[in-house]
């Protein structure tokens, strides 16, 4: 079985932002997302793989037998836009997207250009819904 590429690392999150993000607005948005996701998740940020900033963790196992660990919440300040890893495909989450703001939906993440494009209150609700979903369906660090 293939080894997961996206695992927690010891890279310093602030060093990553300062060296990787070349736009001052994106740096400011990254620091604000860190502040918010730390508050909402109860976990300090950690690097996952080379470019994902994650909070907490959960263990997943697919029917195929593939399993691993992933962050409960996370984001990546990619060059073109942010990738937000905060979404669980639930009825409540789908409804929340109606009031989320300007974004694009990927298979497993939400893409946004800048924090001011979205409704931060809705982001908080999406994060809470995702943590609740993970707590119910996976072995999750959210079980305190």
Image (cartoon, grey):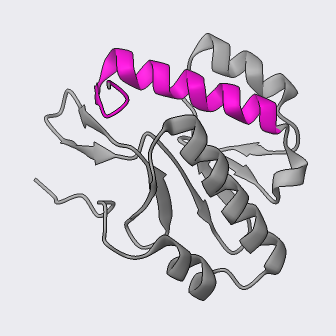
Which residue is more in the foreground, 104 or 133?
133
Residue 121, horizontal then vertical, whole percent: 79, 31
Question: Dominant secondary structure of the magenta stretch?
Answer: helix
Residue 80, image x and y in percent? 73, 70
Which residue: 37% across, 21% down? 135
Q: Which residues are magenta?
A: 120-143
Counting labels gives: 0
Q: Compared to 56, does 51 lie above or below?
A: below
User: Can you say whether 68 is above or below 125 in the image?
Assistant: below
Q: Residue furthest left?
A: 1
Let me know if residue 33 is in the magenta part: no
Side (left or right) of 31 relative to 59? right
**The C terminus, quarter of image:** top left
Is residue 138 located in the magenta-colored stretch of the structure? yes
Residue drawn where x is 50% and y is 60% of the image: 53
The image quadrant that residue 119 belongs to is top right
Taking the spot 31% from the left edge, 61% from the top edge, the residue there is 8
Write the residue at 48% across / 39% down.
Answer: 42
Residue 46: % across, % down: 41, 60
Q: Quadrant of residue 29?
A: bottom right
């Amino acid at each position: 079985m293939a080894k997961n590429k996206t695992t927690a690392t010891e890279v310093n999150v602030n060093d990553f932002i300062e060296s990787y993000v070349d736009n001052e607005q994106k740096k400011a948005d990254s620091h604000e997302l860190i502040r918010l996701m730390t508050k909402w998740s109860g976990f300090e940020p950690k690097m996952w793989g080379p470019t994902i900033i994650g909070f907490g963790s959960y263990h997943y196992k697919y029917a195929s037998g593939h399993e691993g660990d992933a962050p409960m919440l996370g984001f990546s300040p990619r060059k073109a836009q942010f990738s937000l890893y905060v979404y669980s495909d639930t009825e409540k989450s789908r409804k929340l997207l109606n009031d989320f703001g300007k974004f694009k939906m990927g298979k497993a993440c939400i893409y946004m250009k800048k924090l001011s494009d979205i409704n931060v209150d809705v982001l908080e609700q999406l994060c809470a819904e995702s943590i609740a979903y993970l707590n119910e369906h996976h072995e999750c660090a959210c079980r305190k």
